[in-house]
């Protein structure tokens, strides 16, 4: 069974995350598949709008932990970076329909969408700090730009869940709708957009994002550099070791491990 489904309806391409048993947690293969789909759609003049939704009761639980441990992002073009670049360069409207949990990348990827409709059940979370990691997909720039520094600091530094109403208030979500009307709302908007002059739509999107593009690219680059460092840190090792051992993380262990590593390096020097 494919983990990413696509369906054409006229000029609208529907892209569905199809891993409901895992809350649509994203694997490296899924990031690459989404990047390929968007890159192909960008070249297809018959496709004017993309609708992005999910199967099951969650939009996306973010990175699949087991896959992440096997394939942590490193220097160069990771699957996550490929998708980020595909979204950054996609010049046609993207509409997201979010229900249930949108965690980590399931939230930060939304900052690249032009319309985001959230069902009343939607719950967002940016738990990077809980994993010993940092934000991704340029969200360290885009979220504070939309919400203000104080709100972004609260969401990133505490990593607590927040509801669809707050997501709309801070500019992450276009509108909150009843769950049963979520896909219909996204589809209706897609059909309206598909009927507009496509050249004008693409020009408008380019102009709207012109002033932010450089900043988002710089944020993505800085995040990737910091992420690569963090993912190899003692804190992150403790988080994932604790996950596999089914216990709470103990960051005193991480501090002791880091101190021991520094001591060994000093002794070798």
Image: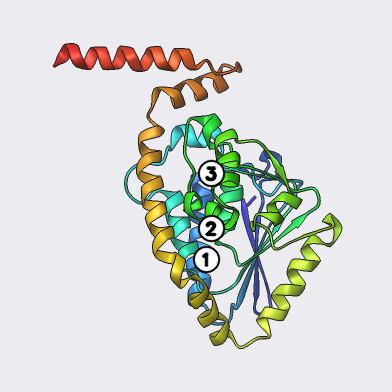
Residue in view at x 57 percent, y 81 percent? 201
Q: Are marks 1 and 2 in contact (CB under 8 Å)?
A: yes
Q: CA distance from mark 3 to mark 2?
A: 11 Å
Residue in view at x 80 percent, y 67 percent? 184
Q: CA distance from mark 1 to mark 3?
A: 17 Å
Q: Label 3 crowding class (10 Å Cα cut-off): few <14, some 14-19, many 20+?
A: many
N-terminal-most mark, 1 or 3: 3
Q: Position of residue 199 (x, y in %)?
A: 54, 86
Q: Nearer the viewer, residue 195 or 21?
A: 195
Asked if residue 57 lies left or right of residue 228, the reply is: right
Name the colour scheme. rainbow
N-terminal-most mark, 3 or 2: 3
Q: Are marks 3 and 2 in contact (CB under 8 Å)?
A: no
SS label for mark 1: helix
Q: Which residue is mark 2?
A: 34
Residue in view at x 50 percent, y 73 percent? 91
* Displayed quadrant of residue 48: bottom right
* Displayed quadrant of residue 257: top left
Residue in view at x 65 percent, y 36 percent? 160
Q: Position of residue 73 (x, y in %)?
A: 41, 41
Q: Position of residue 232 (x, y in %)?
A: 37, 30
Q: Position of residue 31 (x, y in %)?
A: 51, 51
Point out which mark residue 27 bears: 3
* Displayed quadrant of residue 110: bottom right
SS label for mark 2: helix
Q: Nearer the viewer, residue 9 or 180?
A: 180
Q: Which residue is mark 1?
A: 38
SS label for mark 3: loop
Q: CA distance from mark 1 to mark 2?
A: 6 Å
Q: Label 1 crowding class (10 Å Cα cut-off): few <14, some 14-19, many 20+?
A: many
Asked if residue 32 lies left or right of residue 226, the reply is: right
Outermost left residue = 269
């Amino acid at each position: 069974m494919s983990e990413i489904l696509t369906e054409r309806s006229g000029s609208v391409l529907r892209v569905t995350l199809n891993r409901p048993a895992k809350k649509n947690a994203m694997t490296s293969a899924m990031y690459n598949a989404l990047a390929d789909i968007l890159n192909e759609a960008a070249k297809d003049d018959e496709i004017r709008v993309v609708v992005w939704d999910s199967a099951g009761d969650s939009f996306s639980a973010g990175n699949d932990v087991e896959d992440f441990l096997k394939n942590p992002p490193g220097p160069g073009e990771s699957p996550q970076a490929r998708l980020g670049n595909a979204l950054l360069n996609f010049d046609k409207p993207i509409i997201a329909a979010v229900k249930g949990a949108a965690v980590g990348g399931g939230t930060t990827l939304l900052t690249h969408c032009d319309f985001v409709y959230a069902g009343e059940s939607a719950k967002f979370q940016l738990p990077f700090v809980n994993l010993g990691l940092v934000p991704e997909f340029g969200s360290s720039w885009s979220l504070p730009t939309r919400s203000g520094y104080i709100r972004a600091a609260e969401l990133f530094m505490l990593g607590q869940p927040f509801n669809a109403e707050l997501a709309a208030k801070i500019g992450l979500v276009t509108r909150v709708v009843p769950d049963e009307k979520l896909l219909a709302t996204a589809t209706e908007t897609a059909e309206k957009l598909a009927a507009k002059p496509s050249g004008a739509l693409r020009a408008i999107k380019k102009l709207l994002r012109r002033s932010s593009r450089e900043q988002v690219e710089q944020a993505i680059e800085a995040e990737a550099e910091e992420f690569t460092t963090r993912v190899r840190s003692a804190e992150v090792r403790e988080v994932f070791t604790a996950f596999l051992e089914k216990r709470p993380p103990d960051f005193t262990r991480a501090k002791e491990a880091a101190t021991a590593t520094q001591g060994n390096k000093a002794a070798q020097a």
